[in-house]
Structures are given as structure tokens and as C-alpha cells.
Amino acid sequence: MPSTLGTHTLRWYVISATVLLLDQLTKLWVMTDFTLGDSRYISGFFNLVRAHNEGAAFSFLSDAGGWQRWFFSIVSSVISLVIIVWISRLPKQRVLEALALALILGGALGNLYDRLVLGYVVDFLDFHWAGWHFAAFNVADMAISMGAAIMIVDALFFADARESKQDQQTSK
């Protein structure tokens, strides 16, 4: 049965808002303390950098001429709206699914804000090894990745148990 907008639903939106706030605060710090292209050594495998990504993940379509800003903004807006509705309709027992969606929503909104206001997403976490650098990323990207991982774990390990329990309840 779908839930109404109660305390258990509101907490997921609070988690999304917290992710959004942390993402924007860290990006503000990077934009204040770094100029584009700056890099600060932290360890043998990690640097802080200031990078601008006009594309999607791994700079996909970053040099497409500008249309991608609006395309990714529209896609992100639609996905965010779908997630907002999805969370509002989840039964309160679906904790992992709600957490995953809350993290994804917060991250999507963080990167959407950058795209709309700046025209690019600010990335600053640079992991590297033996001269190879992973694509720079940010707090929003981490939240999206964590949310996706939680959704996969939930689907792989807990969906069958939920379905069995639901089948038992409906057969009574």
C-alpha cells in the first residue's frame, strides 16, 4: 500500500536535501580555493583538483557544443521528479530502496543545480594510480553511485524475501 507523506517519507527528502547541501558546500569551497585546473597533492593516489565537466559521467559528450547542458538538465529534472513520486509511494518497509532513491535524488539535484547555474558540473576528487587518473568526481556523484549500489544489493538480495512475504500476506 502506498504511503502518505508522513515522517517516514519526509526523512528520505531530508537525506536528499542533506546530500544536495553537502555537495554544494564542497563545490563552493573548491571554487573559492582553486582556479580551474589547479591540483593539490593529498597522497600518492589522491589529489584535490578543480575540473569542470560540461558532459555527463566520465565527461561523456563534454565537447558536444553546448546542447548537452540542456539535454542533461531535462533528463536530470525528469528523473528527479520520478524519484520524488517514487519515494512518496514507497511502503515504509522498503528502507533500502528509499535510501538508495534519496541518495540518487540528492546527487542528481546537486549536479542539476551546477548545470543550470554554472553551465557545467564542478568535480574535484581525483584518484590516480601509476599515472592513470580516474575521472574526477564530486559528492553528488558519490551519492548517485552509492544509491545505485544500494539499489542493486536490494534487488539482488532482498527482493525475493519481500515478494515471498507479500505472497504469504495475500494468500491469508
Image: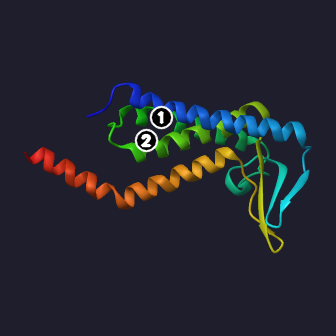
Specify whether 21 is left or right of 153: right
Amino acid at dot 2: Ala
Question: Badge 1 is on which residue?
Answer: 12
- 129 vs 171: above or below: below
Sequence order check, earlier mark of 2 and 1: 1
Q: Position of residue 169 (x, y in %)?
A: 14, 45
Whether the residues at callouts 2 and 1 have beta carbons within 8 Å, the answer is yes
Q: Position of residue 131 (x, y in %)?
A: 84, 72
Regarding residue 70, the answer to whether it shows in the image is: no
Question: Badge 2 is on which residue?
Answer: 98
- Secondary structure beneath label 2: helix
Q: Position of residue 95 (x, y in %)?
A: 39, 43
The Cα atoms of the two marked residues, 2 and 1, are separated by: 7 Å
User: Of the numbered discs in the image, which one, if any, rests on residue 116?
Assistant: none
Residue lying at 38% horizontally and 61% vertically, measured from the top left? 156
Residue lying at 90% horizontally and 46% vertically, measured from the top left? 36
Specify whether 143 is left or right of 49: left
Amino acid at dot 1: Trp
**Residue that lies at the very extreme toward the left in this rendered image:** 172
Q: Nearer the viewer, residue 168 or 74?
A: 168
- Where, by quadrant of the figure, is residue 2 drawn? top left
- 141 vs 79: above or below: below
Residue lying at 83% horizontally and 41% vertically, measured from the top left? 30
The crowd level at tag 1 (other Cα within 10 Å; few <14, some 14-19, many 20+) is many
Q: Nearer the viewer, residue 171 or 62?
A: 171
Q: Position of residue 43 (x, y in %)?
A: 82, 62
- Secondary structure beneath label 1: helix
